[in-house]
Amino acid sequence: MVYSLEQIESAMTARDIEAYRAAQIFQWIWQKNIRNFSLMTNISKILKKALAEEFDINGLVIEKILKTKDGVQKFLFKTEDNQYIETVSIPEQKRRTICVSTQVGCPLNCRFCATGLMEFKRNLKAYEIADQISLVQQSIGSKITNVVFMGMGEPLLNLEQVIKALDIISSPIGLSISQRHMTISTVGIIKGINELLESTLKVKLAISLNFADQQLRQKMIPAARDNPLTELVSAAREYSLKKSMVTFEYVLIDRINDRLEDAERLLNLVKGIPSKINLITYNPYPRLPYKKPSPAKVKLFHNFLLRSNHTITLRKSRGSRIRAGCGQLAT
């Protein structure tokens, strides 16, 4: 198991070992990618031997990597208890973005998402979340610049471990990635959004809105029944005003939510909220019946939104050939 700094400090204190050793060990593990006590050169031989006898530094294992011509890579990781998760690395000019998972499977069962077809197994531990970044960095030979919690699972249903992972990821002696370069994506768990609002975290928030009609939304996203649009939009407005501008993600699905009246409903819903709207064309999956709209439909929808004062982005789908696109992660 790979520990957080706080856990290592507790372990050192319990064994009457100097407290500063915890920071040394943490830095070796997370910043220098050393998982063997014998290679930690600023620790005495006696202490290294004692630590090796009592602790193992284990984590995720890369089982398989799929690549596309434009550099997108999908990683299949195996956990210590033989579960599997997927992670995606996306290069774009000088940016290196990683899409990390927070759960093994997902309990939300969104009708259009491949991950929802999987059986939910468990939440990931903080070190398993951070380890995805560490191992991908080593594999691609480049430092990750941006982290999006948009992989398998709902981050706000595992918020305690996500926050602990953020400590590892943002620590200057850890993975050293600024929280301002991290985005937590949620299907709209209001309780979790409120907890983020009350925290000192500086992460960005993306809400997978997808449907601007409550009845349709709860049909396609069962969790919407307990997280109604009116309350969700209110929480989003507060986050934009108090923390940072919220991004509303909207996946365009053919004949489901791609009409101009859907676009108008969307703009009416988020009116007055300082926010971005991220359009994404649906990424098909063999076991699901949904399709992406025609380019003409997408263009009409996009152009309608451009009339608003919001920042509108039509996101290019990348990685769909290896099923690494939004909604396609399913081991």
Image (cartoon, rainbow, N blue to C red):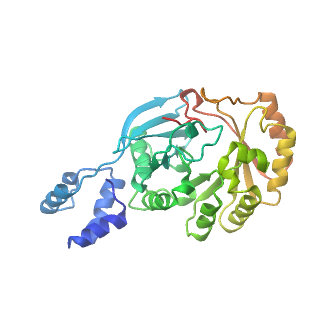
Please tell me which residue is depicted at 69% across the width and 57% down the height of the picture. Answer: 227
- Choose top left, top right, bottom left or bottom right for residue 278: top right
Please tell me which residue is depicted at 79% across the width and 32% down the height of the picture. Answer: 255
Please tell me which residue is depicted at 84% across the width and 48% down the height of the picture. Answer: 265
Q: With respect to residue 320, does 103 lie above or below?
A: below
Residue 31 visible in the snapshot: no
Where in the figure is residue 114, as x and y percent of width and height? Answer: 58, 36
Where in the figure is residue 313, as x and y percent of width and height? Answer: 72, 44
On screen, residue 289 versus residue 134, left or right, reads right
Q: With respect to residue 22, does 107 lie above or below?
A: above
Residue 222 visible in the snapshot: yes
Where in the figure is residue 55, as x and y percent of width and height? Answer: 23, 56
Nearer to the camera, 308 or 258: 258
Where in the figure is residue 10, as x and y percent of width and height? Answer: 30, 69
On screen, residue 2 versus residue 237, left or right, reads left
Nearer to the camera, 50 or 213: 213
